[in-house]
Amino acid sequence: MIRLGLRLVISGGREAVTRFLVLAVAVGLGTGLLLTAVAATNAVTTWNNSHAWFWTGTSSVPAGPAAGIAPLWWHPGGDTFDGQQINRFDVAATGASSPVPPGITHDPGPGQYYASPALAALLRSTPANQLADRYPGRLAGTIGDAALSSPDSLVIIIGHTPAQLAGTPGSVRVTSIATTVPGRFYGRVNPKGLNYMPPNAGIESISIDLILSVVALAMLAPVLIFIATATRLSAARREQRFAAMRLVGATRRQVSLLAATESTAAAVLGVAAGFGIFFLLRAPVAGIPFLGEPFFPADMSLSLPDTLVVALGVPVAAAVAARLALRRVHISPLGVARRTTPRPPRAWRVLPLLAGLAELGFFVVRGTPASPGNEVWALLSGFLLIIVGLVIAGPWLTMAAARVMARRTSRPGALIAARRLADDPRAAFRAVSGLVLALFITTVAVVGITTQDAKDLTQFATPAAAAVVTDQLAASGMFTSSAEPAQSGAGPAAPAAPLAAQLRKIPGVLGVVVVRADAKLTIPGAFHNLGTFPGSPPIAVPAGVVSCAQLATVPALGRCPAGATAAAFPEDGFAGPVDGTTSAGITWPAVNIPASRLGTLGVDAFNVATNGSEPAVEQTRTVLENAHAYPAPNAPSTLGDLIRQDNSGNNAYQQLANTVILVSLPIAGCTLAAAIAAGLADRKRPFSLLRLTGARLATLRRVVALESAVPLLAVAAVAIGTGFGAAAEYASVAQHYPMVAPGVAYYLITAGGILVSLGIIAATFPLLARITGPEVARNE
């Protein structure tokens, strides 16, 4: 029977060969997208794991075997160039057995450093006074891909003597390199008990599990629906062919084997093509910055279980789909020939959808399980139940919409479409199911990101404020937790004046403000709402003293009272409570300190106003970093840098959401086009007979449009409403923030997706004219 099935595929005429090739192409495209989606989720995991060694020196690193291991002095830090973050690690080996960071063969010695390929290229192409002068020594080699998350990663490992790092604040001795990203970032400390989170630290392993689960579900569901739709191409025509075989004596088993042979052969050919499509897409997809930076193409990999599941699962699924499609043939071949109406769907189909919403609602009231892993599964199961519920409830909703349309219209085309929808709502919904899920996914993604942005996104900065380079010596600002271990204390007074003069000589520098230390000085918290956060009472802000003559050269920082020579200024500057959009209008409290005494005070911070150009900002940063008399806990940063760093996580989630939307909507469009074209091919006979009885082509076009548009619009409205409900519950449970409605862009995307879908439906009208002529009816 298998040989006969293959012979029927090859020798069944042009129609059979065309059907076989279309099925293979559709399955191949779906398989290629499926493999790409799986590889992308694997790449995200690899990307996150590559940040593990950044956590060396914190409590996330298990205690290594101290015996026989020479400790490694470890001083992590961060730097910035042109808005790009640089991970810097200063190390000093105390012996040949000292641990070695990944990506290099041995620890760099004094006067040597290793740089990532992207940073090495940047060092070569950038003037030394803007970047290379910050790093002592010479380039000894490049860091291998094993230590990097992306080809664009900027990482440097600098060698020193143990004596140099032993006296550097924030340095620790380690006997092992971290190999895992912590489940939670907060509360991580270094061996000295100081809070620390490295820059570019990846994503909490607990969060990455939830993100990958939701993203995989959101990307794989439309792809799987597309593959399922592809395996059912020309299902009605095949039913009729196999029903005829039953009528002439073929058994159920024989017919099932023939159908499975045809579908499996096409699926096997499609899977082979799908792997080819995956390898063609691999490099371009790796270049998409899913999380703000591209992947290595090698990270877009498939594990052996992934390969086996797809290679074996798709053909098996095709065979099962072919078997299920013949259930009416098995029951009664005469029922197929006479087009027996299937049983209508029942109202119970909405119960899984309601159950999914109820599960998320339960966690809104009772809270999620204490265990982070259980929290992931609790939320994921709710979304999975909702997605499955939409698919199950779709046919019943389609039938309900058809019955409403039948009661409210008297036009022939609408009545025919309503009758056909009510006759087989499952087939009608199947055509639009991918788009319905895509709209649900888009709604949840956009609303979730909008809520996250409203909760965490930092959005203040005037152009003048964003161009001020701040180098703070006391790490108590709101942005400092993402850089180096906290330390406090002011720098010496004497070198400040020569350093300020050196800074003023840089082309593009407009002014320098030195914040002098005064341990007794504070600014009331109610003063222009300094030191306040939403829901927190005002608190007094530790302050230093600035020269009014210097402050006048940097108007973005505010002004002094008339006649004053010195004023109180927050010791953190822009790294603390000063809002860059309002600071220019602040008049700081006057301080009665003689100008001669001001120069004798220690230094809390340097604030350098620039014209915003890259040479001015980067030369300023280099000079400040090389001012060894003023070791700072963080690299000098502009307010624009600090905001970009603070928003980097939100931006990564936004990019990921955009990717999910851009993947799911086109796949849903392909599913719709394939389903409509297949439906037209299956309905050649009834439509041809309608034309012979006098039905106008315009009436048939109206029937086709309504058969697709009614379930699309009806179930899409339910999917969008469900998306808002699920997003609201997720916001309450996981984001701990009230849901925020999306902006105009969401409604434009949604309306555009629906309009494009209607356009796909209209694009099939020329095909309708070709397949419903009198000659088609005669051949039937």
Image (tube, rainbow, N blue to C red):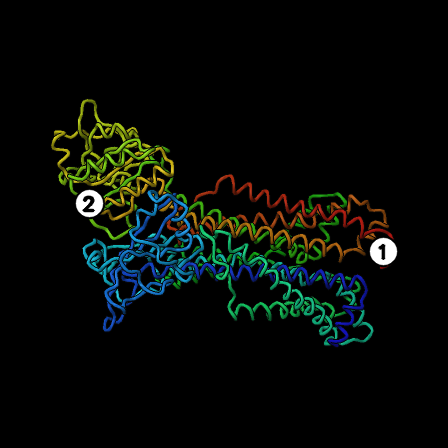
Q: Amino acid at mark 1?
A: Ala
Q: Residue at x 65, y 53 (%)?
A: 672
Can you tell which of label 1 and label 2 is closer to the viewer?
2
- Badge 2 marks a residue whose secondary structure is loop
Q: Report the Cα–Cα distance between label 1 and label 2.
A: 93 Å
Q: Which residue is more in the foreground, 710 or 519? A: 519
438 vs 130, left or right, is: right
Instruction: Kindly identify which numbered label has been placed on residue 777.
Output: 1
Residue located beneath label 2 in the image: 629
Q: Residue at x 65, y 60 (%)?
A: 229
Q: Which residue is more in the foreground, 194 or 174? A: 174
Residue 569 x/y as whole percent = 21, 35
Q: Quadrant of the N terminus?
A: bottom right
Q: Quadrant of residue 73?
A: bottom left
Residue 780 x/y as whole percent = 84, 59
Q: Residues within 10 Å of mark 1 (few under 14, many from 20)?
A: some
Residue 592 appears in view: no
Q: Residue at x 66, y 55 (%)?
A: 431
Q: Amino acid at mark 2?
A: Ala
Q: Quadrant of residue 204?
A: bottom left
